[in-house]
Image (tube, coloured by chain):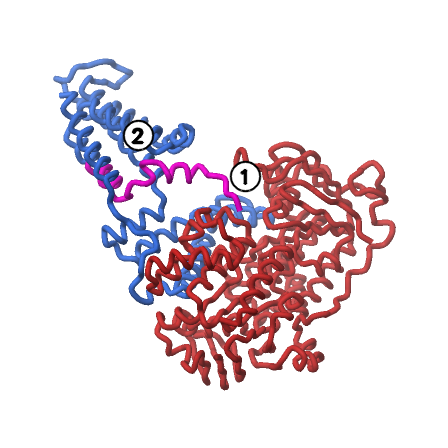
């Protein structure tokens, strides 16, 4: 079905190849799992299989990559779309039509299906992803997990011979991710399509795989084979920074006794350390009649490391923004030390609180990495910025002049973290900080966070990453439908 | 999965919601061209009334939604009326009938009536436009444009994608402004935001184009999941619209 021989690809304008020397075969109906550190060319391989490289993104092609015996770069656009279905990471970037059934039909229309066949196939495809009955709903009203399953229905509908999924569960909460992979497992068990899946969350995807391809950070393959044979080379894969099933990470040490809150986290009276953040009876909504948060109460002290967990849309990001004064509550009060963070001048707020947004790309304010990290810093902080970037694996002498938008997803995430960490704020709010990080990036992040937090800062991390929550949190707050459903100290 | 009927669904299943988008668009054009032939205040008032009434009754638009959609347009109409009263050319005509003298400003009957006519025309355009927008799903409009008006698919679907990205751009702007604040930068409406917005818009456009291509867009002749065809309903609406326009023009003369 798929055959790669000495396949490589280099984007136009790039100094190094994204992929090189790739050799592998995948039989029809089998499932290939592609793993590798961030920036190892996994997404490029997905685009090449779908024929979007070099057709849509130009570059230099070497060797051979064939699907059903035809070079993917030679496929006419129509012939290729008929054979390959591609699911991307972010559902909001692949849903084209407003209504669910129209979106599933979109791919069928493009492939010239007859109307009767479409009307029979659309409900079938929706049933395959457990979205039957949602035909006339607006796609934007679905949850993140449902949207991603809709995207899967859209590419499954034309019955592609090859299904390529590029980190399809990265944006989903753990329950939605498992639901998605369960639907995918059902597709695999039919064996009607060959599946290529790229995943960081290997624990859940591993059981699906018949064969595994591991790529190194230079875009060259490290290992290829069945899951068992690949794991025999575990040391080399570990060294490359790849997540493997059962990878153990070192949790942050518990903060010393004196800095821990004494009893119940919700009762301010019984504490030793003064609260750094206090929220009382906070209500918030973006539009009238649609409350996002309701009656939120919490007190956080220096040294506390709080994981904000809960399903997509539960209000985690909104709460984070309220706590550092990027939004103002509709009712109730928020105090950052003695002041209302929403009323603090930006200059002062930026020294006391840091916030890292879920999508790094949407928070970049400069066209070069160097300008981005130095933005708003005092001249005497430049050396520290340089040092921090080097420790995050992005030394400014190599990365300084690059565009933040052209970094890999993992690199973008680290740059956005650096912009907050460099100011050493006493309250740090991170929205999905481990998103797309390989093991080395994860460990570097944990280490740097640990140093910063040891100085007594208070951390809030909104996260779907159960490993990260377990590794850092001294306290877990669960938000569901805008209400705190659980708030407990973990030991 | 039981789905609550949304307001949008209620409108889409109404008489106006089921009518062809092109029918509604043609009615709007015929009405507005017809109104161009008169400067009397009556006809635009009647047309606006008919449009709003059919929006509420035939389009099942909630009155509050209609008011909200019209709010900014009332403001525009008000500005048009005021500026024409104050700056109307007739005010300098010595033969014109003077109504009032405010300081150095002379206001005449003629300027007043032209201003009213123009303002009412804006009201008519706004009412017709709001009812059209509230009862027409963008998807149906694109279907009608592509299938009946032979508008190129690339253009029509591109416009649809851009329309759907509007909420996303609003979020981009909010996030960028918050990012500036948390980095200690003053001026939450700094011109540099525009550059960031532009970069994000282009990148989003690239990604959507990539996703559409990956799903076989533009790879060959497309078939149609939703067929657009005219029905008796469209004929009835069209005839009704022409009769009401003629009546409005005749009645007042």
Residue at left 23%, top 39%?
A: B232
Q: Which chain is blue?
A: B
- For mark 1, does the 10 Å Cα neighbourhood hold few (<14), some (14 to 19), or many (20 or more) residues? few
Q: Chain of mark 1?
A: A
Q: Which mark is residue A446?
A: none
Q: Residue furthest right?
A: A257
Kindly report which numbered mark, 1 or 2, lies closer to the viewer in this rendering.
2
Question: For this rendering, which residue is in front, A425 or B76?
Answer: B76
Vertical position of residue A434 compared to residue B66: above or below: below
The prevailing secondary structure element of the residues shown in magenta is helix
Residue A426 sits inside the magenta stretch: no
Residue A403 rendering spot, x and y as whole percentages: 50, 64
Viewed as shown, does residue B113 lie left or right of A67? left
Viewed as shown, does residue A283 lie left or right of A56? right
Question: For this rendering, which residue is in front, A329 or A122?
Answer: A122
Residue at left 75%, top 58%?
A: A470
Name which quarter of the figure residue A264 lies in: top right
Where does label 1 land, which residue? A286
Query: Do the residues at pointers 1 and 2 share their chain?
Result: no
Residue A16 rendering spot, x and y as whole percentages: 51, 78
Residue at left 31%, top 38%?
A: B132
The residues colored magenta run B1-30
Chain A's colour is red
Element carrying mark 1: strand
Residue A457 rendering spot, x and y as whole percentages: 75, 51
Q: Chain of mark 2?
A: B
Where does label 2 land, which residue? B54
């Amino acid at each position: 079905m798929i055959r790669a021989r000495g396949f490589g690809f280099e984007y136009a304008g790039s100094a190094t190849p994204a992929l090189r020397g790739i050799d592998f075969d995948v039989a029809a109906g089998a499932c290939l799992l592609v793993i590798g550190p961030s920036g190892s060319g996994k997404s490029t391989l997905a685009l090449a299989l779908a024929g979007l490289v070099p057709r849509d993104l130009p570059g230099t092609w070497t060797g051979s990559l064939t699907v059903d015996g035809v070079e993917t770069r030679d496929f006419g656009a129509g012939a290729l779309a008929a054979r390959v279905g591609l699911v991307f990471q972010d559902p909001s970037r692949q849903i084209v039509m407003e209504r669910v059934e129209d979106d599933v039909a979109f791919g069928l229309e493009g492939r010239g299906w007859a109307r009767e066949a479409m009307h029979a196939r659309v409900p079938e495809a929706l049933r395959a992803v457990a979205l039957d009955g949602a035909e006339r709903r607006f796609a934007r009203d679905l949850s993140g997990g449902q949207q991603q399953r809709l995207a899967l229905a859209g590419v499954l509908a034309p019955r592609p011979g090859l299904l390529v999924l590029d980190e399809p569960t990265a944006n989903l909460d753990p329950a939605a991710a498992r639901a998605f992979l369960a639907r995918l497992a059902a597709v695999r068990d039919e064996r009607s399509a060959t599946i290529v899946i790229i995943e960081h969350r290997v624990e859940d995807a591993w059981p699906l795989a018949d064969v595994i391809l591991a790529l190194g950070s230079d875009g060259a393959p490290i290992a290829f084979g069945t899951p068992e044979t690949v794991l025999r080379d575990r040391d080399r894969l570990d060294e490359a920074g790849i997540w493997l099933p059962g990878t153990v990470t070192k949790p942050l040490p518990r903060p010393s006794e004196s800095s821990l809150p004494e009893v119940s986290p919700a009762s301010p009276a019984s504490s030793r350390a003064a609260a750094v953040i206090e929220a009382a009876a906070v209500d918030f909504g973006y539009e009238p009649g649609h409350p996002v948060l309701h009656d939120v109460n919490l007190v956080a002290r220096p040294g506390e490391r709080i994981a904000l967990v809960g399903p997509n849309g539960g209000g985690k990001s909104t709460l984070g923004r309220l706590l550092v004064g990027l939004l103002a509550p509709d009712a109730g009060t928020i105090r950052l030390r003695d002041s209302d963070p929403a009323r603090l001048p930006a200059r002062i707020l930026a020294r006391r609180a840091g916030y890292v947004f879920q999508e790094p790309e949407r928070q970049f304010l400069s066209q070069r990495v160097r300008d981005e990290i130095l933005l708003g810093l005092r001249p005497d902080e430049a050396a520290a910025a340089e040092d921090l970037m080097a420790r995050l694996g992005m030394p400014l002498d190599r990365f300084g002049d690059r565009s933040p938008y052209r970094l890999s997803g993992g690199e973008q995430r680290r740059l956005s973290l650096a912009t907050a960490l460099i100011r050493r704020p006493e309250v740090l709010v991170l929205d999905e900080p481990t998103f797309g990080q390989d093991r080395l990036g994860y460990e570097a992040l944990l280490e740097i966070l640990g140093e910063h937090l040891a100085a007594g800062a208070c951390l809030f991390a909104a996260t779907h990453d159960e490993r990260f929550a377990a590794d850092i949190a001294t306290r877990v707050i669960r938000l569901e439908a805008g209400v705190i459903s659980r708030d407990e100290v973990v030991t | 999965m039981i789905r609550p009927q949304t307001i949008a669904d209620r409108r889409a299943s109404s008489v106006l919601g089921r009518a062809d988008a092109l029918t509604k668009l043609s009615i709007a054009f015929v009405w507005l061209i017809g109104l161009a032939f008169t400067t009397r205040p009556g006809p635009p008032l009647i047309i606006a009334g008919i449009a709003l009434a059919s929006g509420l009754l035939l389009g099942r638009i909630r009155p509050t939604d209609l008011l909200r959609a019209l709010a900014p347009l009332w403001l525009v109409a008000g500005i048009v009326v005021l500026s024409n009263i104050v700056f109307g050319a007739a005010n300098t005509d010595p033969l014109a009938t003077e109504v009032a003298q405010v300081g150095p400003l002379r206001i005449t009957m003629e300027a007043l009536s032209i201003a009213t006519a123009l303002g009412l025309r804006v009201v008519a355009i706004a009412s017709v436009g709001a009812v059209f927008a509230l009862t027409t799903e963008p998807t149906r409009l694109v279907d009608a444009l592509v299938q009946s008006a032979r508008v190129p698919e690339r253009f029509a679907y591109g416009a649809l994608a851009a329309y759907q990205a509007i909420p996303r751009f609003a979020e981009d702007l909010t996030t960028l402004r918050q990012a500036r604040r948390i980095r200690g930068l003053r001026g939450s409406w700094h011109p540099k935001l525009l550059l960031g917005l532009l970069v994000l818009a282009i990148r989003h456009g690239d990604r959507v184009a990539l996703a559409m291509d990956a799903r076989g867009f533009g790879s060959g002749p497309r078939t149609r999941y939703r067929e657009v065809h005219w029905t008796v309903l469209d004929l009835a609406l069209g005839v009704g619209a022409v009769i009401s326009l003629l009546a409005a023009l005749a009645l007042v003369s």
